Amino acid sequence: MGLFKKLGNALRKTREAIARKIDALLSHGEIDDDFYDELTDILISCDVGVKTSLDIVENLRIRARKNKIRNAEDVKNELKQILKEEFASLNQISIEYPAIITIIGVNGVGKTTTIGKMAKYFKDKKKDVLLVAGDTFRAAASNQLNEWASRTKTRIVKQGEGADSAAVVFDGIASAKAKNTDVVLVDTAGRLHTKTNLMEELKKIDRIISREYPQAHKYTFIVLDSTTGQNALSQISAFNEFVKIDGIILTKLDGTAKGGVIIAIEKEYSLPVVFVGVGEGENDIEEFDSDDFIDNLF
């Protein structure tokens, strides 16, 4: 199944929530102030966010007036174009090798499963991959990552529960350099209720990576659960306090009508979505394509 179809299937609930309401609104035929107010409400209800929805609709209003757009289908196409231009303005990420990708995010968002899927994704691209079990706070995290290592036939570096995460990363980097590994995927703890400890831990991991492997291309991706909608934004804000986030990975996109949060993330944080989870299988992670995403919304 191609990306377009996978993404289309994953966005079915979001598309039904947005497209159905917009089509019903457009069927009224009158493009007036009430139309724009209702369109704003529709976008907000699909977790695009209040500020982002207001900005998008105001832009649409101005362009529709300037271009004398009155036809319902033309209005929809103009809305699509506005969204595509918003995403096109972002600096997209093209992963270069050797790569060290640190995965952050709160517990419960599917972080470890995402790392396992990413291992399969890169191995399918004929890349040598190493998993680093940097979440030593939860024994279950290391065990789960070990299962993914076995499942994807990927090397893993780990230590016991309670070990120093930075020390595990140090060992992982040594192994990666010795074996000329293409991609190192680093799992980390997500215990936001002890933010100070987490902050220092992530800073230490970052220092170790920069010091021990300066030749590598370093990325930090935050994993967000799509079903949480606007709460995903608060998680970005929390982690942004102490780590530079390079991109977003969205999980569980297939199980929610809140896919509009992708637009809010882009607008409020100017962060690119790099990967999306589009199902439960090990192959159900895909590079994000903003044009496909927008085309599948309407």
Image: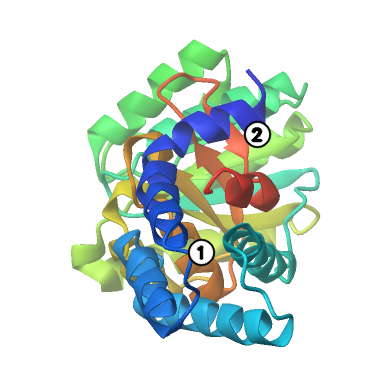
Where is residue 15, by image quadrant? top left
Q: Position of residue 271 (x, y in %)?
A: 58, 67
Residue 263 image label: 1
> As displayed, is residue 245 above or below residue 99?
below
Say which amino acid is labelled 1: Ile
> As displayed, is residue 63 above or below residue 211?
below
Q: Find out whether the residues at labels 2 and 1 contact each other: C-beta distance under 8 Å.
A: no
Nearest to the eye among marks 2 and 1: give it: 1
Residues 218 and 251: in front is 251
Q: Position of residue 117 (x, y in %)?
A: 52, 28
Classify residue 112 as left or right of residue 274.
left
Q: Earlier in the sequence, mark 2 or mark 1?
A: 2
Say which amino acid is labelled 2: Ser
Residue 175 image label: 2
- The residue located at (57%, 83%) in the rendering is 61
Q: Position of residue 71 (x, y in %)?
A: 62, 65
> As displayed, is residue 86 above or below residue 277?
below
Tell me the element at label 2.
Answer: helix
Residues 268 and 190: in front is 268
- The residue located at (33%, 46%) in the rendering is 257
Residues 214 and 20: in front is 20
Does residue 50 appear in this view?
yes
- The residue located at (80%, 43%) in the rendering is 97
Tell me the element at label 1.
Answer: helix
The alpha-carbon separation of the residues under discs 2 and 1 comes to 39 Å
Classify residue 119 as left or right of residue 167.
right
Question: Which residue occupies the extreme left position in the image?
Answer: 193
Where is residue 39, by image quadrant? bottom left
Does residue 158 appear in this view?
no
Q: How many marks?
A: 2
